[in-house]
Every structure is written in C-alpha cells, then in structure tokens.
Amino acid sequence: MENDLKAKVRETLATILDPDINKSLEELDSIKNIDIEDNLINIELEIVQPIHLIAEKINQECAERLNQSFPDYESEIKFIERKSNASEREVLKGVKNLIAVSSGKGGVGKSAFTANLAISLSKTGAKVGILDADVYGPSQPTMFGLEGATLPAIEEPDGKVLAYPNEKFGIKVASMGFVMNRDQAAIIRGPMLSQFFTMLFEQIEWGPLDYLLFDLPPGTGDIQLTLTQKIPLTGAIIVTTPQDISIADVRRCIGMFNKVGANIIGIVENMSYFIPPDMPDKKYYIFGKGGGARIAGEKGIALLGEIPLDIEMREYNDNGKPYLLVNEKGEFNKAFSSITINIISRLRKHNFYAGN
C-alpha cells in the first residue's frame, strides 16, 4: 500500500520541469527520496545549484500537484544541491561560484554594478562576497563605506597568514585598497602585480559563499589574465555602455575570455537610458541605443539586461550604501531583478552541463 502511494507521488512529480535546464525532475533524477508518515509526505529533491529562486518555483508547483492529487495529505519538500565535477575543482573551499565582472574600459559603472549585483544576489538568500582586484582604482571600499579599513589577519602555527574579509550589509568584501594605498600600487608592475594578487586571493578565508564576485580592473591586462588562467571561473560578466567606443572594447574582453575558455555568462548594458523623475513615461537614450544588444547578437552572447541612469544611485554609492538597499520599486530595481534572474538561470545551466 505504502509503496503504491510512493509510486503515485513520484509519478505526480516526475513531469515537473526545471525551466533553466529544460528537463523534467524524472530526466534529471532529482527525486531522491519519498517518505510517508501518517498523513505527511516528505520528499527530498536534488537540484543543480544555485538553488535560490528555482527552489521556490519548483516547491510551489510540487505543492500544487500534491494538494490536487493527495488532498488528505500534507507535504514537505527538502532541497539538496547536486554535486558536480565543477564543485570538485574548487580553488577556494566552500565558494561555489566564482564570477568575474569585467569591462573593456573604465567609466562604464562596472564597480557600481558589482556592488549592487552582490546586494541583489544576497536578497535571494545567497551568501555573497566581493574581491576588489582593481589595484589602481579600488572602488568597493567607497561603495560599502569601508574606506580606511584593513584586512584582519592571523598567523597560523605553520607560519601561514590568513586574512579575513570585512563584512557590510551582509556582503563580505576584500579589496586591494585594504592592503595598499594608490601611491604604493602605482609602482607595482607586470609579474609583481599578478603575484601580489594571487597571494591576496589565496590567503583570504572567505568561509561558505554561494557567489564570489571579482571586480576586475578595466581592460585586458595582467590581473585579468592571471585570474582567468589560474582560477576556474564559473563565469564572466562584461559591463558596457551603449556607445560605439565602449562596444569596441567589449570585443577585446570577449576575446580574452574566449582565449582561456572561460564561460561568458553575458553582457550587461549600463547607463542605457534616463527617465526624468518628473516625467516617468519618458525615456532618453543619452549615450545611444542598443549597443549592448548589437554586440551580444554579433558574438552570440546573452544580453542579461539594461540598467537605467539614476542620479540617486551615484549619490548613495558615493556615500557608502549600494543603491539597491534603498531602491525597492523603481526601474533600477526592476532591471537588477531581471538581470539577477538571468544570471542565476545561466549559471545553473552551465553548472549542470559542467557536471555531466
């Protein structure tokens, strides 16, 4: 009797689709355990990480089907993350997704995007960190109100030094700006620069993280090459603006990531348009229109989204508070919500195929 009921439960859930991977729970072998006690059905589902957002959707569909097919039973669903070959190659213990945020040139808002993306990802329930690798112009200390902070460190009995990131607004932050000033950075060149970054990267104790975002310096120099060659990135995001001059630099970024075989998650177009606060129905394309979409189409890369100009964003970021912490309903928030969903979806698809 119980086995028959378990079989019916499995059959009820089997055809539910994982929309990011476009396969059913049965095809993915996601239904790992079904246990029935009295009138309670306990189900264990294994899904590809990141599980944030998708678990809620799948849970809702499972509950609806179970309520319809088994109205006399309650149900509880537990989600576990699927282990993959990608996770076995972890460079940083406990860090699941390493994402580079890059741009071909300065002035496109890459660091502001990184700070707000971290906040947006954390709102899904994820644990997020940022490593600010821009030696010559570290911005994350300013974005998070951590100017003047240092990296707390301890020396272990074997002589190894471990440093710990600062934490603000639930985001763990480490920056080149915490360990050297700009005058010191200006005299570091070439291999020394890459060596310094590698040392910083390897000595920081991040703890468990769902995402570690690398805020790279603009361009395709030593830091970018060191990162992409030595660290198995889960993916890279390229930030641009609509102008043709920015798009030309994006091509070099794409070439660099393709050269080392890094997964490009997609392109984000920043400063896409401006909506006057007193005329919410108007859009002004101050820097041109559609540049991000054109280069994405040309290179066969996803356009993750377009972010509007917002005067208040600059003011909040400059004063040490990422704008998404206060903007919960505007166009800026809508753009980031959509971009975050797209990033997670593409990461899950990549992680599935990387692990099979």
Image (cartoon, rainbow, N blue to C red):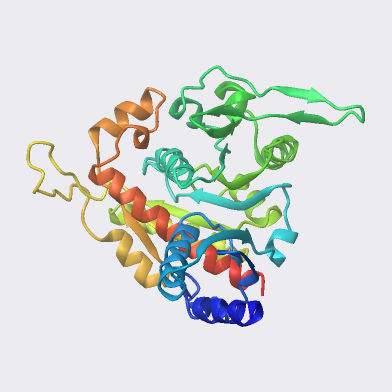
Observer able to see residue 186: no
Taking 272 as reference, is 37 above or below it?
A: below
Report the quarter where the C terminus lies: bottom right
Splitting the image into 4 quarters, where does residue 162 fall? top right
Splitting the image into 4 quarters, where does residue 45 fall? bottom right
Q: Residue at x 33, y 57 (%)?
A: 305
- Horizontal and vertical percent position of residue 58: 47, 65
Compared across the picture, whether 184 is left or right of 142 comes to right
Q: Residue at x 54, y 37 (%)?
A: 134
Report the quarter where the N terminus lies: bottom right
Q: Residue at x 45, y 65 (%)?
A: 63
Compared across the picture, whether 111 is left or right of 234 comes to left
Between 18 and 130, the one nearer to me in the picture: 18
Tag count in the figure?
A: 0
Between 34 and 207, the one nearer to me in the picture: 34
Q: Residue at x 59, y 59 (%)?
A: 79
- Horizontal and vertical percent position of residue 331: 24, 46
Taking 334 as reference, is 7 above or below it?
A: below
Observer able to see residue 66: yes
- Horizontal and vertical percent position of residue 191: 71, 42
